[in-house]
Amino acid sequence: MTARTSPPATSGSPTGSPATERALLTVIVLCFGGMSASLMQTLVIPIQGDLAGLLDTTPANASWVITATLLGAAVTMPVTGSLGDLFGKQRALVGSSVILLVGSVVCAFSDTLAPMLVGRALQGLAMGFIPVGISLVREVTPPHLTATGIASMSATLGVGGAIGLPLSAWVADEWGWHALFWVSAALAALMVLTTVTVIPHVHDANGGRFDVVGAVGLAAGLVAFLVGVSKANEWGWDSARTWGSMVAGMLVLAVWARFELSRDDPLCDLRVTARRPVLLTNLAAVAVGFGMMAQAVVVPQLLQLPESTGYGLGQTVLEAGLWMAPGGLMMLFFAPVSARLMRGAGAKVTLMIGAGVLGGGYLLASFLMDAPWQLLIASCVTSAGVGIGYAAMPTLIMDAVPIREAGSAVGINGLMRSIGTTTASAVMVAVLTGSTTTLGGVALPSETAFRTCFLVGAVAAFLGIAITALIPRAGDNAGLGPVRATAADAHD
């Protein structure tokens, strides 16, 4: 089946019409699912220091509980996007929701490392919900809602993670660590129910065969490379193990790319990905993703350092999460602002504005380190920049690719954001551990290290502006493509 080429039945629907209300409900359900999936990335951070004892393992092994989810999320985005293009986006969304439910239940029953890693990897795989949801928004909304819907759905990548910090700290304190996964299971069950009953099943399946070999090759290359990056601080940046993993991953990805170029029905059409608007947008995604993760790593540590250091702010895990939460909400609040910017100035200019606000927020943070409320202000500014930038990227991508490949292309963009966030985590930890001060016999990051991290985040954001400026003007429009399927006329 192919997407319909007729104009959407909702294109002339006034605000408040039944068609518009159905579209709005669809966007709300998609955003709820996206936030629930992205919440899994920070779900266990409040109990990270206790995981080794809780799972009867070593601290090094326990760190894989977080890494497994990040790896699963990176691998799944292009794969789930491709599945959505082949077999229908609503089916892919239901599948991602079910995977999250299964993974959450596995974790809820786990008391040892092995089943916990399986469950956490499955939770990471549910992140495929987000790129598929973004690409579906264009097909099921009237034009006046599309830009806002895409912006809101894109923002869930950051909102869920920000909300997850205080929520998981509170749940773990009140009901114990297993309750974290029962809460995520309940969210996943609601995702399954609402996705099945509310999300329209658009005739957008393009048919064809799923590239199993390509999916396995991509997964193997990404996992090897990202394991090397994420474990570099633990294994050592000069370790043969670190560089062996990264080089092996790059070699596998090189072979995978050659294989994909030889296929008529590849997992990812690399020729499309190599188009200048798509390539440059994806490179900008690495820079903006780096910027988003930098504050997620640095600000909580600065908030939680003891006041006796002279610059630490002495907050508990829950308090630090609460100070961070408004920043996550800023991403969502700026979704309609991003939509208006895209309609008026174009997606390219909007992405540049977002990266500029992000970089400005980091420069502000380097001067506002003396009180939690100061970091709150800086975090809100940086988060606003991320929200604006994340909203613009999918529109740039979808304007430059055929609609039949929208899910896969947005998935690749999500993958590039994940590479940025993983790299940022490794770089920030390296900076924080490279300049320390000793308190009570314990080495803690120095004030200079925190300020350096903020400046590195600013440089990454400004690099994103430079990359975006090179995107051809032909890709700079907020048009949403000539081919749209609609909820009103495309149900099964």
Image (cartoon, rainbow, N blue to C red):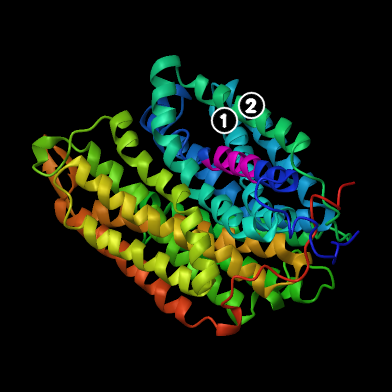
Q: Which residues are magenta?
A: 27-38
Q: Circle 2 sits in a helix, a strand or a loop, which is it?
A: helix
Question: Which residue position is annotated with label 1?
Answer: 116
Q: Residue at x 68, y 30 (%)?
A: 102
| Disc assigned to residue 96 | none
Q: Give the crowd class for mark 2: few <14, some 14-19, many >=20 residues within 10 Å.
A: many
Asked if 188 appears above or below 312 in the picture, the reply is above
Q: Residue at x 75, y 58 (%)?
A: 82
Residue 186 lies in what quarter of the image?
top right
Frontmost residue, 312 versus 30: 30
What percent of the width, then of the height, locates residue 353?
A: 40, 69
| Res. 243 in view | yes
Total count of labels: 2
Specify the quadrant that holds the N terminus: bottom right
Frontmost residue, 227 versus 1: 1
Q: Circle 1 sits in a helix, a strand or a loop, which is it?
A: helix
Q: Residue at x 78, y 68 (%)?
A: 483
| Res. 248 in view | no
Marks 2 and 1 in Cβ contact (< 8 Å): yes
What percent of the width, then of the height, locates residue 154?
A: 55, 54
> Which residue appears farthest toward the top when viewing the image?
175
Question: Which residue position is annotated with label 2?
Answer: 106
What percent of the width, then of the height, locates residue 76?
A: 65, 51
What percent of the width, then of the height, locates residue 180?
A: 50, 25
Amino acid type indicated by mark 1? Met
Q: Give the crowd class for mark 1: few <14, some 14-19, many >=20 residues within 10 Å.
A: many
Amino acid type indicated by mark 2? Val
How far apart in space, not on screen, are marks 2 and 1 (Cα)? 7 Å
Lower sequence index among marks 2 and 1 = 2
Residue 253 lies in what quarter of the image?
bottom right
